């Protein structure tokens, strides 16, 4: 069958032919599948991108943490090293084979003297310096007997008895001084019999303190303040070399300032003075080896002489001193 052309159809029928337009078939199933595949690809790319970014960030974080950890470790090692270097600093002395009794004057209800404001108590300063002395002595290997290491109180006879029973080789009592007037400085008191070992102990401690820095060196004193014919109890009833250190006037601002600023240095100065005395009198040698088999005794002390009475009797009552004769007067609770 021959198909008419449009011109032929129009000549025959007098009109243009109407032709049906063949609709294109849309394959929706294919489109949907393609979209699903495309979405899958996009999701995959997103995940892959996220994974790559996460990996990069993770590596950077790990590197950062590693750097921080290394920095922290280095700092910690440096701090530890510094601390070790500090701890490993050779002590001035070592292996010192002797015993010393350290006494922080007053304590508990007996506050000792106070500063001008009445807010600073001698008992507290005494304990502070004693703990510093203990630290250095133990570092040197010395066996330390503490009369008190807290805010407690012992009677004078109990203090002396504790030291004597421990067979201590030396006894050092730490105090702060007081005076209602313009007086400052450090002094050390010894038995009025002027025993050689006791004097050497006092001199060594005082010289070391002076090297650290004190307002005035008031020297080694014998007997008792205002009355050299009697003694402080601890210098009278202890059998070993002893001394009482008045570490500045708590009533003087300059002495308190020096005490606070040089507390640790003062502690070492006292400790070094004690050890140097042990070497000087032949108790131990430079290496710390003990040279005396028995306890170190102060032979000139009256308590060690059967024909001499102890000079501690006056210590049972506070001394009354005459301030008009340029003799400073301690407070009643400062008498020992």
Image (cartoon, grey):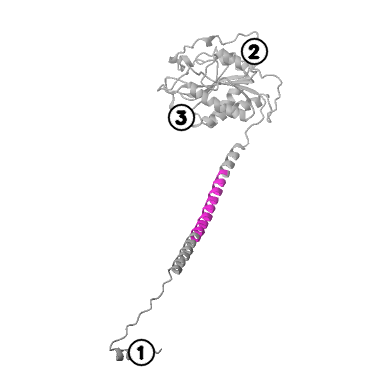
* Residue 192 seen in this snapshot: no
Disc 1: CA contacts within 10 A as few (<14), some (14-19) or many (>=20) = few
What residue is at 55 percent from the left and 26 percent from the top?
Answer: 131
- Magenta segment's dominant SS is helix
Q: Residue 14: percent from the left, percent from the top? A: 28, 89
Disc 3: CA contacts within 10 A as few (<14), some (14-19) or many (>=20) = few
Residue 257, labelled with which disc?
3
Q: Quadrant of residue 27?
A: bottom left
Determine the CA span between mark 3 and mark 1: 127 Å
User: Which is closer to the viewer, label 3 or label 1?
Assistant: 1
Determine the CA span between mark 1 and mark 2: 156 Å
Q: Looking at the image, which is closer to me, 90 or 179?
A: 90
The part of the chain drawn in magenta is: 48-76
> In the current view of this chain or complex, which residue is farthest to the left?
14
Residue labelled with disc 2 = 304
Tell me if residue 333 comes above or below residue 184 in the rendering.
above
Q: Which tag, 3 or 1, sits closer to the chain's start?
A: 1
Residue labelled with disc 1 = 5
């Amino acid at each position: 069958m021959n198909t008419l052309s449009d011109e032929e159809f129009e000549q025959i029928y007098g009109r243009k032919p109407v032709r049906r337009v063949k609709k294109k078939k849309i394959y929706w199933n294919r489109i949907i599948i393609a979209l699903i595949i495309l979405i899958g690809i996009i999701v995959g790319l997103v995940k892959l991108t996220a994974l790559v970014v996460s990996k990069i960030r993770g590596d950077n974080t790990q590197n950062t943490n590693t750097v921080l950890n290394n920095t922290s470790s280095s700092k910690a090692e440096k701090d530890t090293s510094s601390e070790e270097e500090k701890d490993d600093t050779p002590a001035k002395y070592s292996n010192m084979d002797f015993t010393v009794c350290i006494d922080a004057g007053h304590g508990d209800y007996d506050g000792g003297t106070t500063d001008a404001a009445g807010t600073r108590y001698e008992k507290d300063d005494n304990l502070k310096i004693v703990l510093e002395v203990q630290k250095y002595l133990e570092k040197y290997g010395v066996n330390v007997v503490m009369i008190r290491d807290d805010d407690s109180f012992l009677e004078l006879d109990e203090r002396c008895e504790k030291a004597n029973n421990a067979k201590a080789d030396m006894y050092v009592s730490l105090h702060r001084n007081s005076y209602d007037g313009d007086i400052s400085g450090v002094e050390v008191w010894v038995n009025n019999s002027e025993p050689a070992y006791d004097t050497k102990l006092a001199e060594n401690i005082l010289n070391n303190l002076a090297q650290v820095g004190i307002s005035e060196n008031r020297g080694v004193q014998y007997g008792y303040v205002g009355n050299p014919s009697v003694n402080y109890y601890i210098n009278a009833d202890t059998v070993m070399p002893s001394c009482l250190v008045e570490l500045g006037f708590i009533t003087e601002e300059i002495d308190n300032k020096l005490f606070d600023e040089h507390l640790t240095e003062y502690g070492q100065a006292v400790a070094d003075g004690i050890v140097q005395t042990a070497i000087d009198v032949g108790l131990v040698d430079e290496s710390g080896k003990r040279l005396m088999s028995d306890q170190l005794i102060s032979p000139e002390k009256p308590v060690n002489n059967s024909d001499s009475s102890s000079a501690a009797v006056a210590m049972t009552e506070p001394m009354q001193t005459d301030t008009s004769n340029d003799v400073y007067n301690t407070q009643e609770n400062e008498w020992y």
